Image (cartoon, rainbow, N blue to C red):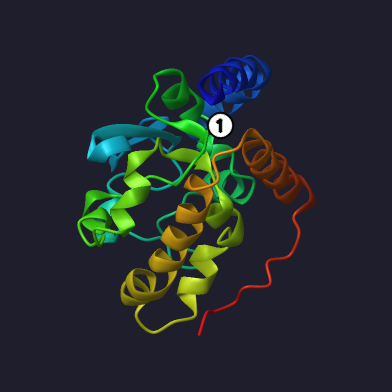
């Protein structure tokens, strides 16, 4: 049933947002040289690699300077990239990943293999389901880059503190795979994006 809803939401989402996708594509071309889309290998269901699609929000080859985005004013992010990231518009192309069966609307956010290689056997449980565009961890850590900007070693903090907590939240979700939970997270995500509720998390202890 969730696959059906994923397909419906992806189709409807692409139809509704198509004019915005065109505008964003044109704006990206006018803002900087380079491709409109950012493609990156991520780890999906059962550890299978796939290429996640996003609107490009960083300068060309910016990811070579680091795996994480640090702070609200990361110098690698383009002018329009800040806007797209703020309203999560850079994630819209992932509706195509959903149509291809590589992702779900709701599910654990797919990580780079660099990070999934660190998962314990227990943590790898979250790889038994399709990754998603949104989940509880995405909502809770929507200001993740700002959190990382306030610690001395962002990568270490992400690996030792944020990543385990995200996995814990995802394990709770995949063990309660109800449609009610699926829709709850979708509506919660929409509410957060449009109402911009403040995030009370500044730094975990």
Residue at 53% over, 56% down: 137
- From the viewer's side, name the closer residue of 193 and 18: 193
* Camera-nearest residue between 37 and 51: 51
Mark 1 surroundings within 10 Å by alpha-carbon count, few (fewer than 14), some (14 through 19), many (20 or more): few
Relative to 81, is 143 above or below? below
* In this view, 190 is above or below 114: above
Q: Is residue 42 above or below residue 169?
A: above
Which residue occupies the extreme right position in the image?
A: 195
- The answer to which image quadrant residue 171 occupies is bottom left
Q: Position of residue 38 (x, y in %)?
A: 37, 36
Q: Residue at x 22, y 56 (%)?
A: 114
- Residue 163 shows in this picture: yes
Residue at which label 1 appears: 27
Total residue callouts: 1
- Is residue 40 in view? no
Q: Position of residue 154 (x, y in %)?
A: 37, 74
Image quadrant for the N terminus? top right
Q: Residue 135 appears at what percent x and percent y?
A: 55, 47
Q: Is residue 157 left or right of residue 142?
A: left
Question: Can you say whether 109 is above or below 160 in the image?
Answer: above
Q: Residue at x 39, y 19 (%)?
A: 100
In this rendering, position of residue 153 left or right of residue 80: left
Q: Is residue 199 left or right of residue 36?
A: right
At which x and y percent is residue 51? 30, 32
SS for dot 1:
helix
Q: Of residues 47 and 110, which is closer to you in this image?
A: 47
């Amino acid at each position: 049933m969730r696959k059906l809803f994923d397909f419906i939401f992806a189709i409807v989402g692409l139809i509704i947002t198509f004019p915005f996708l065109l505008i964003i594509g044109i704006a990206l071309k006018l803002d900087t040289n380079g491709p409109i889309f950012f493609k990156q290998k991520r780890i999906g269901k059962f550890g299978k690699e796939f290429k996640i699609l996003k609107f490009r929000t960083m300068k060309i080859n910016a990811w070579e300077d680091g795996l994480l985005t640090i702070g609200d004013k990361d110098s690698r992010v383009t002018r329009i990239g800040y806007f797209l990231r703020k309203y999560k518009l850079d994630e819209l192309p992932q509706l195509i990943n959903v149509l291809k069966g590589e992702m779900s609307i709701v599910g654990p956010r797919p990580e780079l293999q660099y990070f999934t290689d660190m998962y314990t056997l227990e943590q790898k449980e979250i790889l038994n389901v399709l990754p998603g565009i949104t989940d509880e961890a995405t909502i809770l850590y929507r200001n993740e880059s700002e959190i990382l900007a306030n610690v001395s070693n962002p990568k270490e903090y992400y690996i030792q503190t944020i990543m385990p907590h995200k996995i814990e939240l995802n394990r709770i979700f995949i063990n309660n795979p109800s449609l009610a939970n699926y829709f709850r997270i979708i509506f919660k995500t929409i509410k957060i994006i449009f109402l911009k509720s403040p995030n009370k998390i500044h730094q975990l202890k």
